[in-house]
């Protein structure tokens, strides 16, 4: 039903594992939100998480950079390895981890500061820029990658919260790439974007894939098919099926996957 | 035909006619608005009544009656007075004789016996002598003296003392009022603005005219300085820790409950605590603004902590997520993003806490912050903290408790000064709030 893009085959060859999750369980208090999930996320690959609303996509994504630490009632069990190192190890400082594993949140959340400061904040605290000129370069590059440069280049000192919803989302994408993470987690980055901006963001994702590993949560089957090489289908906290995108969309093994992508459940 | 049938279809109602439910809703809405307006009007009414009565009762404290008279002391009078046993008495007699001769010179026909003039002016000989011993060159030269009239003359001008209510006493007699009227017409007695009330120190119980609130304003200032310097950093640090860093468990719940309880503890309890801990145990000086400030700090801390935590809580969690998401540490997220957004609330809470502390009386009475200071201001900055002093509300309390009715005016006047300070602080709070509140 959905055409798997032809370029996927050639790219799946690179199978260095970037993140490997084994037996992950997540509980919110008594709610069992993620049930025994095993996933291997490959380096230099775009991995899509799809599934009906409330199935735990965001929850699992937030485990990958330990953003769930901020939720008091959330408990995570199992192993998640980044480059073979357990990210839930006692020696891991989540702050250092999050510099490597960046995130774009489901709801746009720009800082109530200027557009410039929104982008410059990350590079500043990580010392990525030696001087103001360096920082200017990073800001421009990031805004261009976020497909928002043309719209904001004349008002970099205007508040980031004064942008439209879709512009804010792209600002957040630009902010996330400004710190040069090794893995970028994107939670429905295009849910508020028009087709043109969506195409630009997808182009960015494709470009990021050259150096980084990207995980994207999406509700759009077309988008998953267009940008990803691997797709994971979640249902009620279970990882139902995880395979090459072309395989998932043309020849799914599980009947639940098939009914979801053909629009029968969700 | 078709038209008519269309009108009769029940489902399509016109939006030009208002149906019963909408009418009911509108009615309840306008009722609610009316209640609100009534409540505000009532509040404003009482506010106006309060202000009018305070201003009316307090204004007399800001005026004083002065007797302005030109007087020349000749060299031989000077020598004669200095040779006497009762030197100040001699000066007084000479001065009064001077006033009498002036009245004669201006053809003012009024019975002005020395005793009556003495009742008007009080004991002035000392002041006159002090003037000439400080300015010996003025002997033989004419000089205009402006002397405060006695408090009962003040009362006569303020309307507190009238011919009808006056009971003859050794302080004032009915016939003296004729003399006062005549002197007023002659321009010798005048009403003037009483700077001494704002800048001066408290006076003895028998001299209400000379009482001023200035020194206790300074006392309050040093106390507030102690409160601000201690309670703002401690309160804000405690709230940030509790709100952003502390694990949510039984201990932090316990602390939270106790902070709320502390906020509800009557202030007099803090006073007795201060007396026991700071004065009896730690032997800090009594009546010192330092101790007053410490006690008020204890009282203000819960207020600041509660309002700071509330404003930290109101910062949307997505901002913290955003900061953590780009790899900021918790501390960076709090200080770079959360705190600036919470700033207006923190400042407002702090200033409200300070204003509360400024008006607090009960704990100050217990630690003796009602020091009677007649010798003027504390020496220097350190002295301001440790030398005995009073505070504005305690001073007002002291005046209100004194027997002489003239002190009553002073108490009201003190309340006006206190309110001016409170209003100023509230205005500062509003300005800071506006400045820090970024509307984006
Ligand atoms: N902070 C939280 N506290 C308690 N339960 C939560 C919390 N966040 C998520 N959940 C629960 O965990 C489950 C998975 O939520 P999650 O947000 O991961 O879904 P999702 O797949 O991202 O859905 P959507 O597509 O709508 O974003 C849901 O049942 C939700 O109710
Ligand atoms: Mg989600």
Image (tube, coloured by chain):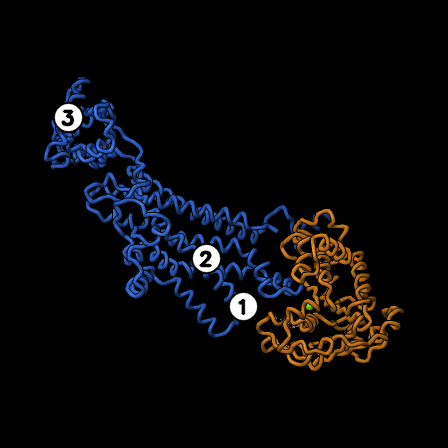
* Residue B356 falls left or right of residue B11: left
- Secondary structure under tag 2 reads helix
Mark sitting on residue B232:
2
Closest to the observer, B66 or B440: B66
Q: Vertically, is B210 above or below A39? A: above
The answer as to whether callout 2 falls within 8 Å of ligand 1 is no
Per the image, the residue denoted by label 1 is B245
Q: Position of residue B155 (x, y in %)?
A: 22, 36
Q: Measuring 49% from the left and 53% from the top, which residue is drawn there?
A: B347
Q: Which of marks 2 and 1 is nearer the N terminus?
A: 2
The blue-tinted chain is B
Decide which of B357, A31 is in the foreground and name it.
Answer: B357
Left or right placement of residue B264 versus residue A210 in this view: left
Earlier in the chain: of badge 1 and badge 3, it is 3
> Dot 3 corresponds to which residue?
B77
The CA distance from mark 2 to mark 1 is 19 Å
Q: In this view, does B299 lie above or below B414?
A: below
Which quadrant of the frame does ligand 1 lie within?
Answer: bottom right
Q: How crowded is mark 1: few (under 14 residues within 10 Å), some or many (20 or more)?
A: few
Name the chain under label 3: B
Q: Give the quadrant of residue B187.
A: top left
Secondary element type, mark 1 = helix
Q: Residue at x 44, y 48 (%)?
A: B426
**Which chain is orange in the rendering?**
A
């Amino acid at each position: 039903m959905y055409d798997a893009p032809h370029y996927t085959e050639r790219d799946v060859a690179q199978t260095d594992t970037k993140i490997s999750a084994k037996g992950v369980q997540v509980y919110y208090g008594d709610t069992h939100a993620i049930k025994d999930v095993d996933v291997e996320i490959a380096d230099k690959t775009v991995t899509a998480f799809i599934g009906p609303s409330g199935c735990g996509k965001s929850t699992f994504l937030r485990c990958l950079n330990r953003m769930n630490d901020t939720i008091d009632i959330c408990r995570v069990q199992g192993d998640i390895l980044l480059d073979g190192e357990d990210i839930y190890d006692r020696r891991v400082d989540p702050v250092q981890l999050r510099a490597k594993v960046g995130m774009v949140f489901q709801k746009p959340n720009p800082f109530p500061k200027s557009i410039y400061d929104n982008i410059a904040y990350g590079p500043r605290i990580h010392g990525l820029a030696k001087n103001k000129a360096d920082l200017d370069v990073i800001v421009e590059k990031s805004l261009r990658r976020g497909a928002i440069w043309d719209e904001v280049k004349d008002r970099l000192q205007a508040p980031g919260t004064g942008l439209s919803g879709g512009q804010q989302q792209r600002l957040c994408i630009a902010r996330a790439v400004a710190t040069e993470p090794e893995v970028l987690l994107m939670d429905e980055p295009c849910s508020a974007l028009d087709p043109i901006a969506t195409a630009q963001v997808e182009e960015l994702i494709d470009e990021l894939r050259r150096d980084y590993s990207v995980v994207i949560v999406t509700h759009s089957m077309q988008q998953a098919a267009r940008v990803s090489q691997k797709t994971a289908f979640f249902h009620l906290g279970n990882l139902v099926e995880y395979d090459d995108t072309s395989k998932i969309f043309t020849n799914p093994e599980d009947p639940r996957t098939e009914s979801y992508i053909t629009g029968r459940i969700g | 035909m078709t038209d008519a049938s269309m009108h009769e279809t029940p489902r399509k109602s016109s939006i030009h006619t208002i149906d019963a439910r909408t009418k009911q809703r509108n009615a309840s809405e306008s009722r609610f608005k009316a209640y609100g307006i009534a409540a505000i009007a009532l509040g404003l009414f009482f506010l106006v009544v309060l202000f009018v009565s305070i201003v009316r009762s307090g204004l007399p404290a800001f005026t004083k009656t002065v007797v302005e008279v030109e007087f020349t002391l000749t060299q031989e009078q000077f020598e004669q007075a200095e040779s006497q046993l009762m030197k100040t008495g001699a000066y007084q007699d000479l001065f009064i004789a001077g006033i009498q001769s002036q009245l004669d010179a201006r053809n003012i026909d009024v019975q002005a016996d020395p005793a009556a003039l003495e009742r008007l002016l009080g004991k002035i000989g000392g002041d006159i002598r002090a003037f000439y011993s400080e300015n010996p060159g003025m002997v033989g030269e004419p000089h205009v003296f402006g002397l405060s009239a006695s408090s009962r003359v003040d009362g006569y001008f303020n309307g507190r003392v009238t011919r009808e209510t006056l009971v003859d006493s050794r302080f004032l007699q009915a016939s003296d009022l004729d003399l006062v009227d005549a002197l007023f017409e002659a321009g010798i007695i005048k009403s003037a603005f009483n700077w001494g009330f704002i800048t001066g120190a408290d006076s003895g119980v028998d001299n209400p005219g000379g009482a001023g609130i200035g020194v206790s304003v300074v006392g309050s200032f040093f106390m507030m300085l102690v409160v601000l310097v201690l309670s703002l950093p401690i309160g804000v640090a405690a709230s940030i820790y509790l709100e952003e860093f502390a694990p949510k468990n039984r201990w932090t719940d316990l602390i939270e409950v106790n902070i709320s309880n502390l906020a509800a503890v009557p202030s007099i309890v803090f006073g007795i605590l201060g007396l026991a801990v700071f004065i009896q145990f730690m032997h800090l000086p009594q009546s010192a603004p330092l101790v007053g400030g410490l006690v008020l700090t204890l009282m203000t801390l819960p207020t600041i902590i509660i309002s700071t935590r509330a404003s930290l809580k109101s910062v949307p969690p997505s901002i913290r997520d955003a900061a953590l998401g780009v790899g900021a540490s918790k501390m960076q997220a709090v200080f770079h993003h959360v705190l600036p957004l919470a700033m207006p609330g923190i400042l407002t809470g702090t200033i409200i806490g300070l204003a509360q502390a400024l008006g607090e009386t009960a704990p100050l009475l217990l630690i003796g912050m009602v020091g009677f200071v007649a010798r003027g201001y504390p020496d220097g900055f350190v002295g301001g903290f440790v030398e005995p002093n009073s505070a504005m509300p305690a001073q007002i309390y002291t005046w209100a408790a004194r027997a002489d009715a003239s002190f009553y005016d002073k108490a009201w006047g003190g309340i006006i000064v206190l309110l001016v300070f409170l209003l100023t602080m509230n205005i500062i709070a509003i300005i800071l709030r506006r400045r820090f509140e970024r509307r984006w």
